[in-house]
Image (cartoon, helix red, strand yellow):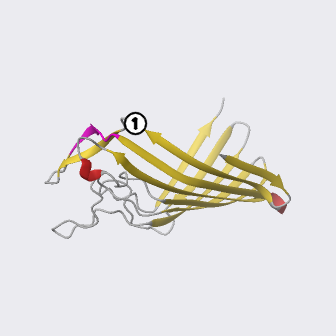
Amino acid sequence: LTLSRSNGAGDWGLTLFATRWEDKIATLIVDYGTPVVQQPQNVGEVMARGLEAQWSRRLTGGWSLAANYTHARTRVVRNLANPALVGNELPNMPRHKANLALAYEPGGDFAARAKLRAIGSAFTDDANTVFDARGYRWKKSAYAVLDLAATWRRPSWEFTLALDNAFDRDYVTGFFWHQEPRTLRGEFTLRY
């Protein structure tokens, strides 16, 4: 169910969702040893409910602002193979996600953008383990990252200079996977 509107305050939308999966396939951990052994497995029935809100507005002088937020709650509703997992959240499904972007594009030949990404904490495994017996943290912590980019455009070429993870934040995005540190990258496109 979506409501949206455009007016002097900007463009906004609000979406409520409820999704039910039957016979959902997910990657489950079958052995927590070293290395961890995972395999695809049927987790039965899963529900996801939540809302998404978005807003954007053009400001004066080529500036614009955009924001979005998603709240999602996943739950295993039925699992005949492993009833102990009923009620648990799906792995790698944070409840909260948000983005805030400020852009500057005074004309067609230059654009700059700053984007703040915030992701809430999420479980890494189907058992929803926070800490194991050895003290390892399995639940990923929430994090926020700032990305910056500038693009120069001409009819025959385009150059983008970007600084990802501007504050050099150390954060985990996957199964104990630490994301890239601060990264400066350039991209040049030649059109002929």
Quadrant in which residue 148 is drawn: bottom right
Please determine whether, in this image, residue 20 is positioned above or below residue 181.
above
Left or right side of 64 for 32: left
Left or right side of 93 for 96: right
Is 41 within the magenta?
yes
Q: Residue at x 26, y 45 (%)?
A: 28
Left or right side of 61 for 126: left
Is 176 within the magenta?
no
Front-lying residue, 98 or 50: 50
How far across and down, in percent of the image, does residue 61 sit? 83, 61
Helix, strand or loop for the magenta stretch, by majority: strand
Q: Residue at x 18, y 50 (%)?
A: 36
Q: SS of the residue at dot 1?
A: loop
Quadrant in which residue 32 is drawn: bottom left
Residue linked to disc 1: 22
The magenta segment is 38-44
Q: Residue at x 13, y 54 (%)?
A: 33
How far across and down, in percent of the image, does residue 90 sit? 37, 51
Please determine whether, in this image, residue 142 is positioned above or below residue 40.
below
Q: How many marks?
A: 1
Q: Residue at x 16, y 51 (%)?
A: 35
